[in-house]
Amino acid sequence: MMSFVDAIRNTSEISECLRAGLQALGSNSTKIRVVSTNHLKGSVDIDSCVKCAYPTDHRWDYIFGYKDHVYYVEIHPGSTGEVKVIIKKLNWLKQWRNHSATSLENIQYKSTYHWVSSGKIAITKNSKYSRILAQNGISGPNSILRADKFL
């Protein structure tokens, strides 16, 4: 099976954007918690990296590798009105991965999708919005992503 780093390097649209640890997340890296930083495989700011190729699309934000898992992270306001936007972004991500990032598609079974709120969270755990997100395979919105909970 292909490693996270190999999958990124084999994806031409983002191969030059791989950064060590969580560096690609910039100041948003404070919203991610891992037990062991030694097990971080790297990160990519997908949104910035492919903006020129897909300027008007609802692009997903980040990807990072940790241990043997891949985390797709969207940092976005946590209001109910944003649920449809998050789902559009996820659909874009899946289409993009299927067409332009097939190496990532090959390791998708170890992938999880996370909405991390950039501010206050207005979506309660048992609301219809939480159910819609869960049905789409999206965890969150949470104020912090604790990556080890998803291993």
Image (tube, grey):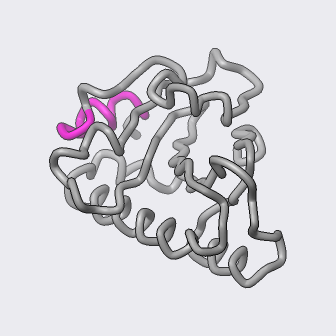
Identity of the residue drawn at 70% across and 39% down: 147
Q: Is residue 122 above or below residue 35?
A: below
Q: Nearer the viewer, residue 76 or 108?
A: 76
Q: How far across and down, in percent of the image, does residue 132 sit?
A: 63, 80
In which quarter of the view is residue 38 placed? Answer: top right
Q: Is residue 60 above or below residue 24?
A: below
**Location of the N terminus (image quadrant):** top left
Q: How far across and down, in percent of the image, does residue 53 sit?
A: 16, 49
Q: How far across and down, in percent of the image, does residue 95 sit?
A: 30, 65
Task: Indicate left or right for 59 with 56 as reference.
Answer: right
Q: How far across and down, in percent of the image, does residue 88 sit?
A: 42, 70
Identity of the residue drawn at 17% across and 45% down: 52
Q: Which residues are magenta?
A: 3-14
- Residue 88 on the magenta span: no
In which quarter of the view is residue 79 placed? Answer: bottom right
Identity of the residue drawn at 41% across and 53% down: 60
Identity of the residue drawn at 56% across and 69% down: 82
